[in-house]
Image: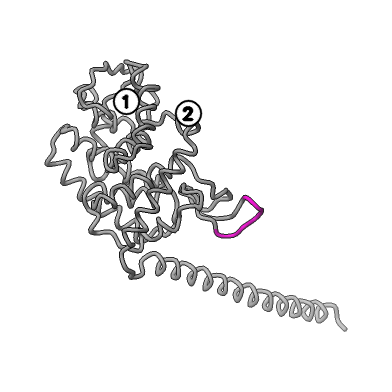
Amino acid sequence: MPYYLFGTKYLIVIMSITKKYFVLLFFFTFLIFLVVCGGISWKLWENNCATQYPAQLSIEQSLNQGIAWLETNRANILAEENPMLWWMIKQSAELTQSTTLLSLYSEYKQRYLDSNPRNVWAYLFNANAKVFIDPLQLENMPDYNLLFLYASSCDSLLAQEPLVIEQLSPNFCNTRMLSPTCVTHQLMGLRIAQIHQCGDIGKMNQVSSQLQERILNQLFWDFRVVDVYLQRVWVIVESGAGNKLKPVWIHRVLSMQNPDGGWPGFESLISISNQRSLGFSSKGIDISTSESNFHTTAQGVLLMSLLRAGR
């Protein structure tokens, strides 16, 4: 056979094999695409399907179990100074008058507020606090903490901080799309400002309404039942828009609660070992555990306290 004919025949064979592999690759890619689209469609339906509002007994039981988890883990959570978490415990204690929650907050107050008269976060718990806010204390503080501190203290110098002023705009989170908690943190700050009567309350109310709609939109599309999901639900309830929540969102928060009474910040999908799983976290897909933690449980307890109080 002439050399050029042999080369042509070899090329035809290669092209035939390549075409078969291309068809197989296209088929499997298309199959994966269908599976992914089907999975997303199912999760969206599951996250937004019509259902009855949870029974009050379910909310009561969830609250009691959450409080029991806090008491069981008293030593560990009291080692965490995070003021916003303890503000949530204080709000829950006042709503429920639970002796456990009141005792926990009292111990936190003695350990971190009463023993440190220079603690600027005293304003968050007591609007009449008299603590000097040293600008040096604000260095490297996250943007939302600056807003929380201004909102609770009504400090005139903080009111002039560019990063505080920016957070009073409904467009602040537009450039922070990768931060899943940006909008909820912003609404928390505005709610604290409204409670403490800081700034232009009319403007605060208007911006808060816009942020509520944005969070409701996030709840519709983001079906990951993780820490930020729970945060979105309780912020909507606390800010007075609980009637706009879909009952299924509250059901999903209830089902997120662990048997030990606490809430995890992670949604397990596929078990990898006895403790670790592949699943959803607030940042996306991760490998972690579904262990209960203080950060998520404090929010779960506040949500159930609000719902129990008819908010």
Q: Is residue 107 above or below residue 11?
A: above
Q: Is residue 272 magenta?
A: yes
* Residue 72 horizontal side relative to residue 273, left or right: left
Classed neighbour count for the residue bearing mark 2: other residues with Cα under 10 Å, few (<14), some (14–19), many (≥20): few
Q: Quadrant of residue 19?
A: bottom right
Q: Which residues are magenta?
A: 269-275
User: Residue at image x 45%, y 70%?
Assistant: 42
Q: Determine which quarter of the picture holds residue 158.
A: top left
Calculate the distance from the C-alpha at mark 1 to the C-alpha at mark 2: 16 Å
Looking at the rendered structure, the kind of residue marked 2 is Ala
**Residue shown at 40%/52% (left/top)?**
62
Q: Identify the residue at image location x=32%, y=49%.
A: 234
Q: For the residues carrying marks 1 and 2, which lies nearer the camera in this image?
A: 2
Secondary element under disc 2, as helix, strand or loop, is loop
Please tell me which residue lies in front, 175 or 134.
134
The x and y percentages for residue 78 are 45, 30
- Check the image and report above or below for 13 versus 169: below
- N-terminal label among 1 and 2: 2
Residue at mark 2: 79
Camera-nearest residue between 128 and 7: 128
* Relative image position of residue 47 (x, y in whole percent): 39, 64
Task: Determine the secondary structure under disc 1.
Answer: loop
In the image, which disc is placed on residue 262?
none
Name the amino acid type tagged 1.
Trp
Are the residues tagged 1 and 2 within 8 Å (C-beta)? no
Given the current orientation, which residue lies at the most extreme front position? 99
For the N terminus, the quadrant is bottom right
